[in-house]
Amino acid sequence: MQLFRWSKTHEVYLPEIDAEHRQLFQRGSELYKAILAGAEPDRLSALLTDLLQAATDHFEREERLMRSAGFPSLAWHKQQHDAVRKRASECNARVAAGESEARVELLKFLSSWLCDHTSVADRMMGAYIRNWQRRERALAS
């Protein structure tokens, strides 16, 4: 099974957002490969922390962008981000309690969620933001 495989179907055509999405896929893949290779728990924890921090930072940037553009589905989109934050927190607590399989469970969830989210919700957001940016440029000229 391959997790965190990036493809064109995940592009939202906002260069900064697409770059961040590719980084999330890359970090997730790196963690999954480290798990399969039997990396030390400290290394796995560091990789997971890095992935989750990158996701948190990305969600915050996306939410600021949607807020500034007046994206009408911001609350719905943020609920999806909040669900990931909650699931990650729950799995982290399980990993801290010694349930190492929670890490793989979280990765499978994140990989599936990220694929679905970028392909649908983020594409909707991307279309809205691109139109908003065009409108802003037209008004400025």
Image: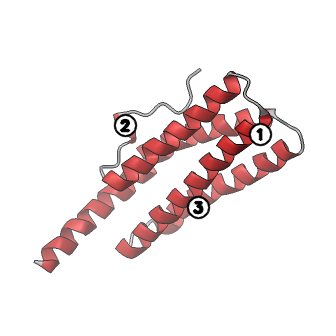
> Mark 1 against mark 2, which lies toward the viewer?
1
- Quarter of the image for the N terminus: give it: top right
Q: Residue at x 77, y 31 (%)?
A: 40
Q: Earlier in the sequence, mark 1 or mark 3?
A: 1
The amino acid sitting under disc 3 is: Gln
Side of 126 where 100 appears, left or right: right
Mark 3 lies on a secondary structure that is helix
The span from disc 3 to disc 2 (Cα, nearest Å) is 22 Å
Q: Earlier in the sequence, mark 3 or mark 2?
A: 2
Give the numbered dot on residue 42: 1
Residue 52 location in percent, x, y?
63, 50
Side of 1 where 65 appears, left or right: left
- 17 up-or-down from 94: above or below: below
Q: Residue at x 56, y 29 (%)?
A: 3
Residue matched to label 3: 79
The span from disc 1 to disc 2 (Cα, nearest Å) is 34 Å
The amino acid sitting under disc 2 is: Thr
Mark 1 lies on a secondary structure that is helix
Residue matched to label 2: 9
